[in-house]
Image (spheres, rainbow, N blue to C red):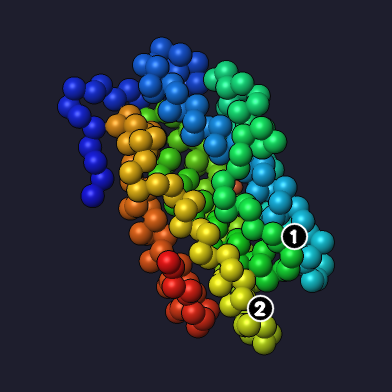
Amino acid sequence: MTASAPSDVQIPEVKTAGDLAQQPEEYQTAVHKIVASHAVNELYGAHVFDEPAIKLAPTPHAKWLACRIAMEEYHHHVRFKALADEIGIPAERTDPSVKKPLSIFEFQLNTWAEFCVIKAIADYAEILQVEDLLHCSFHPLRNLARVTMPEEKFHAKFGKDSCLELIQAGKADEVQDAIDRYFPITPAFFGASQSKNNEIYRKWKLKQRTNDEMREDFLGRVSELVEKDFGLRLPVLN
Ligand SMILES: [Fe+2]
Ligand SMILES: [Fe+2]
């Protein structure tokens, strides 16, 4: 169940980046955290997964798709970084060499099958995050979510289709092996169960759902993808 804001809190509808400065400090800080996090992680993800995947792609068409995905992920960073600059977030907070990226990017990418699994699973997780921002009370973030969503959907679909191609080509063991090693690190992407940040995001209607609600949704969807669509096994989480 989604927690509702206390009745004494006036939820603003902030239409432009320029209007942010008039909002309560807690609201501004929360917006800064969300924007900075997307800016850092889109850049780092493109750098460690999407760009290296171009050389792993096995065919000209796969290389073209990997190029397109890398370009789009870098562009997601560019969009979030432009908003970060507009609302005055210091440059070091959107720089992955200063601000630590999320743990899902610590996976060492070595094979094409791993990249396909990452796109099928992690980009679905990203879809859930972006979807949650579609109703954000800070409209510039809502607008970014709208333009980003079709591309994230394309990435997840690419991942699914590419995994199916590998499975049909007799490489199901490679896909299973990548799932076994990558999937266990993904639930942490949604953050802690009792997250103070998430509580504040929901209080101000910047985000709509708890970390656990999103994680639950994700786990249900991934188990359907892996077990039903791929006919493979989802590793048991500790
Ligand atoms: Fe992205
Ligand atoms: Fe993506």
Secondary structure under the numbered disc 1 in the rendered image: helix
Q: Is residue 194 left or right of residue 3?
A: right
The reply to whether residue 62 is in sight is no
| Residue sitting at the far top | 22
Q: Is residue 53 left or right of residue 91?
A: right
In the depicted structure, whether residue 46 falls above or below residue 226: above
Please state which amino acid type lies under the numbered disc 2: Glu
Q: Which mark is residue 53?
A: 1
Pointer 2 residue: 174
Q: Position of residue 9 (x, y in %)?
A: 24, 23
The reply to whether residue 168 is in sight is yes
State which mark lies toward you, 2 or 1.
Answer: 2
Residue lying at 35% horizontally and 36% vertically, measured from the top left = 196
In the depicted structure, whether residue 25 falls above or below residue 53: above
Q: Position of residue 56 (x, y in %)?
A: 79, 65
As rendered, which of 147 and 205 lies closer to the eye? 205
| Label whose residue precedes the other's in the sequence (2 or 1) | 1
Q: Residues within 10 Å of mark 2 (few under 14, many from 20)?
A: some
Residue lying at 39% horizontally and 56% vertically, measured from the top left = 215
Please state which amino acid type lies under the numbered disc 1: Ala
Corner quadrant of residue 221: bottom left
As rendered, which of 64 and 54 lies closer to the eye? 54
Corner quadrant of residue 19: top left
Q: CA distance from mark 2 to mark 1?
A: 16 Å
- Disc tally is 2
Does label 2 point to a residue whose CB lies under 8 Å from ligand 2? no
Q: Position of residue 152 (x, y in %)?
A: 56, 52
| Residue sitting at the far left | 7
Secondary structure under the numbered disc 2 in the rendered image: helix
Q: Is residue 192 left or right of residue 37?
A: left
